[in-house]
Amino acid sequence: MRKKLKKTYKLLRSYYFSALYKKIHLKSEFQPKFIKLKKPKLNKISYKVYSIKNCRIYTNCVENVSVIKNNQLIAEGSMQQISGKLVSAKRNEVLRSGTPKFLKKINGNVFNLTQGASGYNNYSHWLLDIVPKIIILSKAYDLKKIDYFYFSKLNHFQKETLKILKLSSIKIIDSKFNKHCLVENLMFCTHPHYFKGTLFKAHSNIPKWIIYNLRKIFLTTASKKVGNSKKIYIDRSDSQYNHCKIINDTEIKKYLKKKGFKIIRLSEYSLKEQISIFKNCNFVVGPHGAGLANLIFCKKKTKVLEIKNIGHPNIGYQKISKYNKLKHQFIMLKKIENNKQGDMFLPIKKLENFLN
């Protein structure tokens, strides 16, 4: 009964907002502005930056972002996933369900950073997906003229990032509470590296210019208060993302402490402190997770032992290690049977063999 009522409510809501804002069709009818990133040791990759007057943007904050002009969906600015896989704009949610939220008018220049759920609170997606969008925009437009970023409420490391970039004055339009906006001048760019498939696989082919620019921007900001440990283990026991955990983590940490490793919970450190920790260490051990994005800041020949389950598609940290000339190895483990989160058991003997 409850499911039927919910379905009926969604249907009535869709009819109401379709009548209010009219049906949306798929069409792209404007010319993009091209820019090229040309930096030493970078691939020459062309990106597009767009600016549209009096344009709507809508997101469900999960797998759908829609840019709409004159009730026409602009494919270049929209993003749609189904079960985590990028699909054609023809399958964008608003073409079927409309924009079931009341419209909020925003004056000024707004740059869209949102890409659904990924990037909101995830450290890795923030560094590898969102910050590169800001870098792309900076090559085509004066960032001082941006009034707002369309994103979610910023957490501590995101605020710190914008402070380092000297962009703290730019206000945030929280997309979670402003899902449907009419913007005086909406700006957006093509994604830095996500063009097809899943975001996991996209991270496995991340362009070199992203790593180069992140190092150039952030390495000089490293904190001098921390970062004396040469061997570190990344503890994910406090992660809000309940997947790919080592179920005998306590045993692993006890063993590694005896081997001279410092146990690091990255949530307890600022961005500048995390940069310093990875910049100064010689050996990183840890399960696959967002914290390993800090491999961006490691020095040449740093040893990396990444623990992940067999079949996990993301080899992005191996790619980062290759760019930075790190000594990267995997410990590949079978997932715990009947465990949907991809949790693993790591025998001490197996870890010992790798360390030796």
Image: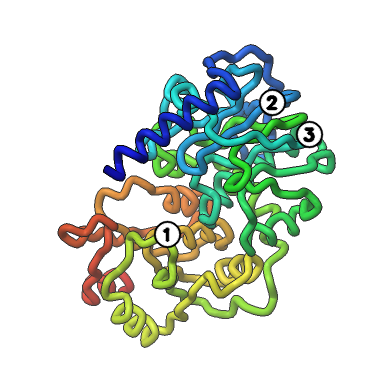
**The C terminus, quarter of image:** bottom left
**Residue 235 position in % (x across, y down):** 42, 72
Q: Quick one: 290 or 115, which is closer to the camera? A: 115
Tell me: 207 left or right of 37.
left
Label 3 amino acid?
A: Tyr
**In this view, the mark in front (2 or 3):** 2
Callout 2: helix, strand or loop?
strand
| Whole-number angstrom distance, CA of label 2 to CA of label 3 | 19 Å
**Residue at position x 45%, y 48% in the image:** 319
Specify the label residue 218 is tagged with: none
Callout 3 crowding tier (Cα within 10 Å): few <14, some 14–19, many ≥20 = few
How are the residues colored? Answer: rainbow
Question: Which comes sooner in the sequence, label 2 or label 3?
Answer: 2
**Residue 95 position in % (x across, y down):** 48, 22
**Residue 216 position in % (x across, y down):** 69, 52
Report whether residue 169 is seen. yes
**Residue at position x 62%, y 60% in the image:** 155
Callout 1: helix, strand or loop?
loop
Image vertical order of residue 292 relative to residue 189, above or below = below
User: Mark 1 = which residue?
Assistant: 289
Label 1 amino acid?
A: Gly
Label 2 amino acid?
A: Cys
Q: Quick one: 147 or 258, which is closer to the camera? A: 147
| Whole-number angstrom distance, CA of label 1 to CA of label 3 | 33 Å
User: Mark 2 = which residue?
Assistant: 55
Tell me: 145 left or right of 8.
right
Q: How many marks?
A: 3
